[in-house]
Image (cartoon, rainbow, N blue to C red):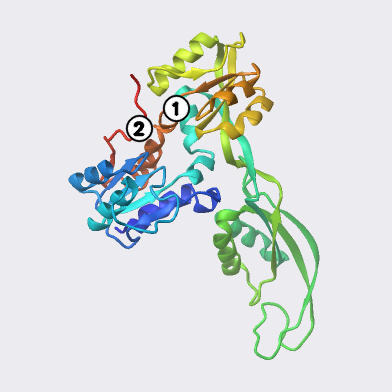
Amino acid sequence: MNIEEILAELEKFAPLQYQEDYDNSGLLTGSRSFEAKGALLTLDCTEEVVEEAISSGCNLIIAHHPILFSGLKKLTGANYVERTIIKAIKNDIAIYACHTNLDNVKQGVNYKICEKLGLKNPAILSPKAGTLRKLVTYVPESLRQLVSDALVASGAGHIGNYDHCSFYTEGTGTFRGNDNTKPFLGKPGELSHEKEQRLETDFDAACESNVISALLKAHPYEEVAYDIYNISNKHQGIGSGMVGEFEKEISEEHFLNLVKSTFKVPVIKHTKKTGKMIKKIAVCGGSGRFLLKNAIQSGVQAYITSDFKYHEYFDAENKLLLVDTGHFESEQFTPEIFYELIRKKFPTFAVRLSKTNTNPINYF
C-alpha cells in the first residue's frame, strides 16, 4: 500500500480546499508513492517525533500543525524546523499536515472536543461562505432520474441531513449536429427540438471534479451542456468553531472543574464568573479569539478556546464565561481523529499515537 491511499482517505474527510489561505496543510516531505510502512500520529512534528517514527518503523508522520508554515531559504540545521526537515528527508519519512481543513469540517477538531465534553446537538459556530456550487444541466425526460442518482452518488444534492436535493423543470432543447456526430436524439444535419428537463442541484466545491465526472459518464449526450455557479450561501457543515449543549444545565464551578478534568490541565485561565448556569457552550480548538463575537451572538453561556491576550479578556464584557485552556491542551485530542479514520479504513495497517509530548509550554 502506498502513502497516497492513506492521504486520499484523510483528504476525503478533510479536503485541502477547506484550509485557510495562510495555512500549509498537505504533504510537506516525502512522496505519495512511498510504500506505507507505518504512521505516527501527533499534534506537532518535532525532531523528537521524527526520532520516535524512526525507532517505531513508521515512515509517515501525520501532524495537525504544519512544521513548515513559511518558505525555507536554507537547510543548514540552524533551527528546530530545519533540523526536523533534514532528519525526515535523510530517513525517507513523509510528513503530512492536516490543519485548518480539519478545523473546518463538521466532524473535525471541534466535534472531537464536543464529544469529550459530552455535548449534544453540535453545530458549526461560524459557517463558511464560498464553498458551495450549483450545477445546472439539461437531460432527456426519460433519463433525468438516472443522471440525478449519479450526481447524488458523486456528492451532489446533499443539504444537511437530506440527500437527493434537486429541482427540475420541463422545457424544449434545440441542437443540430454535423456529419461527424452520432446524436442520442435526432439525426445529424437536422435541427432537433426535444423535450428536456432542466436539472439543478447544489454540491460542495471539494466534490466538483467528482460531480462533473459523474455527470459526463451518466449523461447520454455526446456533448453535455452544463453550467456551474458559485453560491454565496454559507455552508452549515463547514466552518469555524462549534456550539453544543449539555443535557442539563450545570453551575459555573461544576463547568470549570469539568473543563480541567477533560483537558487534563493543572490550571485554566478564565474571565470573571457571570453567575449564570451553563447549558450551551461554544468551543474552538487552537486560537479562537476571532470567534468571540460569534460566540456571544450565539447565546452561549461559556466559550472554551485558547491564546487570548490580556486586554482581549475584557472583550467578553461579562456576557459569557471565557475559558482559555491553552493551545496544546485544546487540540490534544486531534490525533485520535486520524487514528479512528485510518483504523476504520485500514484495520491491519500499523498506526500509532505518538508518545512524545510536544507541548512547548510547561507549568510550575
State the residue at coordinates (45%, 19%): 268
Q: Would you call the spot at circle 1 few (<14 residues within 10 Å), some (14-19), or many (20 or more)?
A: many
User: What amino acid is found at the position of numbered circle 1 in the picture?
Assistant: Gly
Residue at 72% x, 60% y: name it: 199
Residue 311 pos. (x, y %)? 58, 24
> Which numbered disc covers residue 326?
1
Numbered tag placed on residue 342 in the rendering:
none
For residue 45, say whether it is visible.
Answer: yes
The mark nearer the N terminus, 2 or 1, is 1
Q: Which residue is mark 2?
A: 359
Q: Is residue 200 above or below residue 50?
A: below
In percent of width and height, residue 125 lies at 61, 33
Q: Is residue 97 above or below residue 259?
A: below
Between 364 and 163, the one lying in front of the other is 364
Return the x and y of residue 189 as percentages of the image width and height: 75, 89
Residue 68 position within the rendered picture, expressed as x and y whole percent measured from the top left: 40, 50
Horizontal side of residue 131 vs 358, given as left or right: right
Q: Are the residues at dot 2 and dot 1 in contact (C-beta closer than 8 Å)?
A: yes
State which quarter of the image contains the N terminus: bottom left
Q: Name the secondary structure under disc 2.
A: loop
The structure residue drawn at horizontal position 56% and vertical position 13%, both measured from the top left corner, is 248
Q: Amino acid at mark 2?
A: Asn
Element assignment for label 1: loop
Relative height, residue 301 to residue 55 (above, below): above
